[in-house]
Amino acid sequence: MKTNKKFLFVGFLAILMIAWLSGLAISQNRVVIIGTVNADLQIIADNDQVYEIGDTEKGEELSGLVDEKVKVTGTVEEYDGAKVITVTSYEVIKE
């Protein structure tokens, strides 16, 4: 009986460790960018870095905010040398 409890406990700890490591991997790719949306479907960040807006529902909404300053949260991947942000949320920054 004690052996079964040990295996159950070790299994539970292994599942917790996997869940924790998965959460770290997911959160490492999340970024927040502040910049201006342009007519070329890009965000020009305050540090002059250019991000292509990913083709998603939130990305399409964001693309309609040309010349607006925005705060964008999402994940960034590189394709053919261009940084593409998949938008998960955004807000317009009123100046």
Image (cartoon, rainbow, N blue to C red):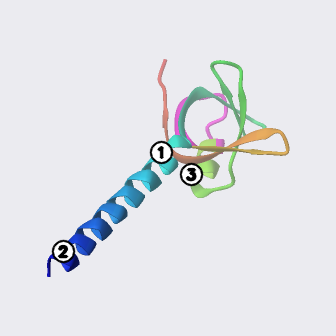
Q: CA distance from mark 1 to mark 2?
A: 33 Å
**Rendered image: mark on residue 5:** 2
Amino acid type, residue under disc 3 in the picture? Lys
Residue found 29% across the figure and 66% down from its top: 10
Image quadrant assignment for residue 66: top right
Neighbourhood count class around disc 2 (C-alpha, 10 Å): few under 14, some 14–19, many 20 upward:
few
Out of 23 and 59, give the one closest to the viewer: 23
Q: In screen coordinates, is 10 left or right of 72?
A: left
Q: Is 1 drawn above or below residue 91 in the view shown? A: below
Q: Is 35 drawn above or below residue 52 in the view shown? A: above
Callout count: 3
Amino acid type, residue under disc 2 in the picture? Lys
Amino acid type, residue under disc 1 in the picture? Ser
Judged by depth in the image, the label closer to the viewer, 3 or 1, is: 1
Q: Secondary structure at mark 1?
A: helix
Judged by depth in the image, the label closer to the viewer, 2 or 3, is: 2
Residue found 69% across the figure and 54% down from its top: 55
Q: In screen coordinates, is 12 left or right of 57?
A: left
Out of 36 and 19, give the one closest to the viewer: 19
User: Which residue in the structure is indicated by mark 1?
Assistant: 27
Q: Is residue 68 magenta?
A: yes
Neighbourhood count class around disc 1 (C-alpha, 10 Å): few under 14, some 14–19, many 20 upward:
few
User: Which residue in the structure is indicated by mark 3?
Assistant: 58
Do tag 2 and tag 3 residues touch (Cβ < 8 Å)? no
Q: Earlier in the sequence, mark 1 or mark 2?
A: 2
Residue found 57% across the figure and 47% down from its top: 87
Image quadrant assignment for residue 5: bottom left
**Rendered image: mark on residue 48:** none
Residue 92, percent from left and from top: 50, 32
Q: Earlier in the sequence, mark 2 or mark 3?
A: 2
Which span of residues is magenta-colored? Answer: 63-74
